[in-house]
Image (cartoon, grey):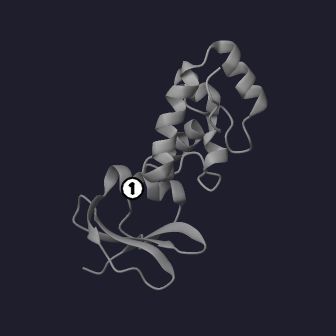
Amino acid sequence: MTEPMQPVWIAFPRIPWGSIGWRMGAGEDYWHAWAPWFRSLPEAERDAYKSEWPEPDGWKDFYAFIETGKLPGWFQERQQKIAEAAIPPTLDEDVIEDYHRVLWLIRQHLKRVGADRPLPEESIAELYQSPDGVRWRLSSHATRGGMRLVRQAQ
């Protein structure tokens, strides 16, 4: 048996599954080392590893994803909620705060046109433009989380 690596959630306990922390920086490096190492184990060793390190809360379906590429249930549910929220802004909307709708808008409908200076209570501030030329400001509260799109005055 090769020297075992710790599961990603033990090596980086502050990075939840699905976080950008697994796609950049030290989390990404570890993930890209761990996944091929795990897949290279003989089936019996993989089964023993999974018994020793069961998936904790928030990591359900992780081993199946690594072994087969099958997307976890939580990811599929999130994608479904985003698809259901695929509604462009109406003329009378000035603020949009529904998480899944904001995700759809910034991923599929709006075009990022720049950054803005975050206010003291914000962690991010970015500027977007809709196909009809309306500008929107995306922000996220530093301590509460959540995202908010606010229509900008023309």
- One can see residue 83 in this view: no
- Circle 1 residue: 105
Q: Seen in the image, is 117 located left or right of residue 49?
A: left
| Image coordinates for residue 37, horizontal then vertical, percent | 54, 27
Crowding around mark 1 (Cα neighbors within 10 Å: few <14, some 14 to 19, many 20+) is: many
Give the residue at the far bottom of this rendering: 120
Q: Seen in the image, is 150 located left or right of residue 67?
A: left
Note whether 4 is above or below 99 in the view shown.
Answer: above
Q: Secondary structure at mark 1?
A: helix
Q: What residue is rendered at 50% in x and 27% in y? A: 36
- One can see residue 122 in this view: yes
Q: Nearer the viewer, residue 130 or 50?
A: 50
Note whether 76 is above or below 48 in the view shown.
Answer: below
| Image coordinates for residue 27, horizontal then vertical, percent | 51, 48
Q: Seen in the image, is 68 located left or right of residue 28?
A: right
Q: Seen in the image, is 137 located left or right of residue 43?
A: left
Q: What residue is rendered at 77% in x and 30% in y? A: 52
